[in-house]
Image (spheres, rainbow, N blue to C red):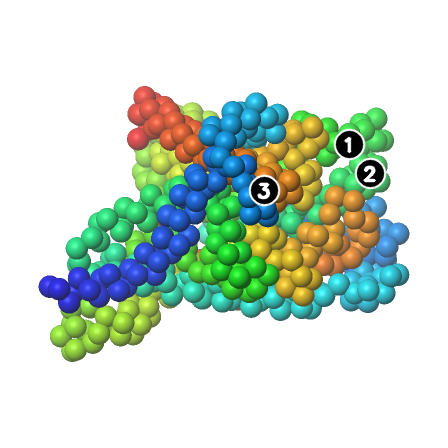
Amino acid sequence: MMKRNGTGWLFASPYLLYAVLFFAIPLIWSMYLSFTDWNLISPVYYFKGFDNFIEAVKHPGVQAAFFVTFKFMAAFVPMVIVSSLAVALVIHGLPKFKGLFLIGFFLPYLASGVVSSLIVKGLLSHNSAFNVFLRKFGIEIDWLSTPLSALLVVAAIIAWKFTGYYALILTAGFESINKDVYEAAAIDGVTPSQSFWKITLPLLYPAIFTVLILSIGVSFGIFTEVYQLTGGGPNYATNTWQMEIFKQAFTNLSAGYASAVAIIASVVTFASILVIRKLLEMWGKRNGWV
Amino acid sequence: MVGSKKGLTLRYLIAFALLIVMVFPYLYMVMNSFADWTQVDKKVVPTEFTMRSYEWLFSGGEAGIARPWLKAFLNSVIVSTASTALMMVTGAMVAFALAKMNFKGRDFINNAVLFQMFFPAIILLIPTFLIIQNAGLYDTYTAMILPKAMSLWAVFMYTNFFRAIPDTFIEAAKLDGASNFQILYKIVMPMSKSITTVVFLFLFMERWTELLWDMIVVRSDSMLTLNVLLSQMFGPYGGYPGPMYAASVLLTVPIIILFLFFSKQFKEGMQFTLK
């Protein structure tokens, strides 16, 4: 028995090492730093109690990060649900080329956020074919300098990336639905649109739930696209938590203050996901979908 | 809509149209990387082509100072390969312990993995950077590899897969005198090829496109990964759209080739993953 315990721990040892070195120690260090005014370089620093936290809550960058995350979620989650649902709806159960579609729709997931941002930057540059076309109809938008459109553009880039991946999850959900249900419904005279809303969607809810949870998680971790395209602007309109923490820690070198912001960000993220998850579960239960 | 022949044709038409829309950004990138500079971004489909963007990239343009694209490509290959290999080895090891070994503390470790997996990682960014800096690893490959030598997601995926492997295989091997390492390496891993492909592709892709971490732990030009170099070179005010697309092609094409190469196993592996 001793020996077996030993090998178990031996196999698990990479995790233990990793958890101590890159989880436990950083976690404690982060809390310690958050009470100091350390600037990442100077050997001298002072304790400030909760000053960093108070300062952070009043800071427009932090306040923006809080609201931008939810605004981003409000744009991104519906976008990606509709697009991945559309793809899954079209490709599920196709007799031929299904492999081609699964692979093809997955390709955007491989894109670096830097690359997709640069492509969009080109597509939306002032004299691009797209903008010239819009100008013919008198539509002139400076996409990345307008707060609302900047947020929507970032949301669209990320929705593009995740659509194929989520469509795979939904396709698997579609294919697990027993086809007899539809035949029975057809005999009872149920119209196609009724059968979509009353049969397909409820039976698909477990897969939709997974996609909802995943996409909500994504909403709290946006950095690359924002860093590359807007730097958090215009006027904090796309300032995500990661962007704010990066700026404070590695541009302004306020490591102590940035640690406090990171703790706030983590608490907000953890609590929000928990609450949203609970609400979704309750909503699903009330409708009898789970 | 479900069964009829007409409905099926319509669905294929919509599916192909959607597919073209989804891969259009890639097509746009490739076309513009070869487009004549007067046409870059000016035409949806360029009509005149040139290699000038790629030449500019490797010659350094008017200034004649070429950025280290090939070195950056090599850096990305080294970092992504080493990091992914470590994540897979450690992932499979820990998962084997969690799924197939009975020992005191297993449930505790299992819960710790799940807890850490859903813990917001942003809180760890600054102190992890400080650990690397204090260890004298700033501006090295190790700085980019070590904190990404383990993936909890990989542990999670492998654990789920290993649990589905019948214990009889493992007990039979034990009776033959095989050690745990031998069982993992010679019996369990060969049975896990499809899931291994999925885990490998996801991890490699994620590592290949990492920006934030690789950007903060590296300073010298010769150490930058391709993704970081691309990001720095074509920031918010960068001109030269042609070379921007050419560099994007350099970053994107290898990962797509890798993915297409493993696409058959990927499809099989996803079937398990999605259950």
Q: Chain of mark 1?
A: A
Q: Nearer the viewer, residue B160 or A103?
A: B160
Residue flagged by tag 2: what amino acid is it? Answer: His
Labels 1 and 3 in the same subunit: yes
Q: CA distance from mark 2 to mark 3?
A: 40 Å
Residue flagged by tag 1: what amino acid is it? Answer: Asp
Residues at marks 2 and 3 touching, judged by CB atoms closer than 8 Å: no
SS for dot 1: loop
Which residue is under mark 3?
A: A39
Q: CA distance from mark 2 to mark 1?
A: 7 Å
**Residue at horizontal 65%, vertical 29%?**
A237
Residues at marks 2 and 1 touching, judged by CB atoms closer than 8 Å: yes
Mark linked to residue A126: 2
Horizontal side of residue A86 vs A20, given as left or right: right
Mark linked to residue A142: 1
Residue B202 percent location from the top left of the image: 48, 56
Vertical placement of residue B192 versus B123, above or below: below
